[in-house]
Image (cartoon, coloured by chain):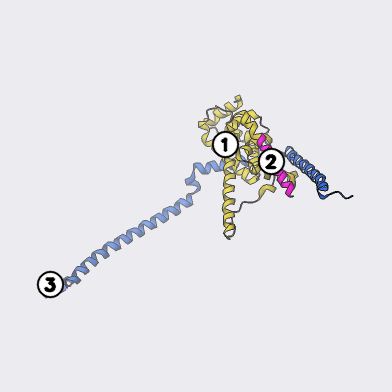
Amino acid sequence: MQPSNNETEKPLKAIKMKDINKEIEKTLQSWDDVKRSEANPFLYTRIEQKIEDLETPWQTNRVWYWQLLLVAGLVIFNLFTIATALSSNENQSVYDTIAEQYNISTDVQSTFNFY
Amino acid sequence: MTAADKILIDAMQAGNQKAFQEFVETYQNMVTNTCYGLLQNVADAEDVTQEVFIEVYRSISKFRGDSKLSTWLYRIATTRSIDVLRKRKRRSMVQSIQTFFGGEASAMQVPDNRSQTPQEALENDERAAVLAAAVAKLPEPQQIAFTLSKYEDLSYQQIAEVMDKSISSVESLLFRAKQNLRKYLADYYRND
């Protein structure tokens, strides 16, 4: 007489569970074999360098500072040029608008000649 | 705090560079090992170790000696390592969102470093990798307690001091950590 499916599955499951538990135990035990990590032999030198960089950023980033200074100078120069140009344009355009509205010549010489 | 630690701290607080070097050399393996235990990646562990010592250098004047020097160092090392783990999680979340919306994964991928161990002998050991992956799944407090216990062989009392918890809560954390690990490993081997 053949055993039913359920009857054969039970021992198989039990064997599988046993194997899994064995694997779990072995895996958990593998932790005990792990050796301690050791620090990099150049660790102190690297830390020292980083601390120096942090304490004297203006020295390590000297090029960066010069670049920033140059950009700032250019921006200020540009702003000054633009502002000067705008103020002269503004004055000019106001005079032109008034002259146009009243039909007056903005040429001073010709105005004198008229009289 | 030991007398040697007291002398070292006094010298460091006075700005003695040699004392700081001695301090780094004394505690570097302890810090690296703790960071590696949590991060499971050599490069990250080295970076965090450097950060830990730089933080010590900057804040040594504030150290009043209320706790042991090693306890203080363990605290900084675990806090910094957990920060890195959180960043990793955030990055992998962003990555999975990008992948979900059809975008390509960014260049700043989180490498699967679980297989990289400093121990040559265990490099190809699947068990170590499986266990490390299972530990990484643990909630943060359980992860810290488990790592300090297994990697650093700290007693419950010492772990309690580092984590600022009672001994009984450390016991319960470790108990739950082991239970969770068994559960994760059972799931892994069942699906294997």
The boundaries of the magenta stretch are B175-192
Residue A110 horizontal/vertical position (percent): 15, 74
Q: Amino acid at mark 3?
A: Phe
Is there CB contact under 8 Å for labels 1 and 3? no
Residue A50 horizontal/vertical position (percent): 55, 43
> Earlier along the polypeptide chain: callout 1 or callout 2?
1
Instruction: Check the residue under mark 3 and report the chain it is in.
Output: A
Chain whose colour in the figure is yellow:
B
Numbered disc in front, either 3 or 2: 2
Residue A107 horizontal/vertical position (percent): 18, 72
Instruction: Give the secondary structure at mark 3.
Output: helix
Between the residue at mark 1 and the residue at mark 3, the CA separation in whole angstroms equals 87 Å
Counting other residues with Cα less than 10 Å from the Cα at mark 2, is it few (<14), some (14-19), or many (20 or more)? many
Instruction: Give the secondary structure at mark 2.
Output: helix
Q: Amino acid at mark 2?
A: Leu
Q: Quadrant of residue B25?
A: top right
Residue occupied by mark 3: A112
Residue occupied by mark 1: B76
Q: Nearer the viewer, residue B54 or B183?
A: B183
Between the residue at mark 3 and the residue at mark 2, the CA separation in whole angstroms equals 103 Å
Q: Residue furthest right?
A: A1
Instruction: Check the residue under mark 1 and report the chain it is in.
Output: B
Q: Quadrant of residue B76?
A: top right
Q: Amino acid at mark 1?
A: Ile
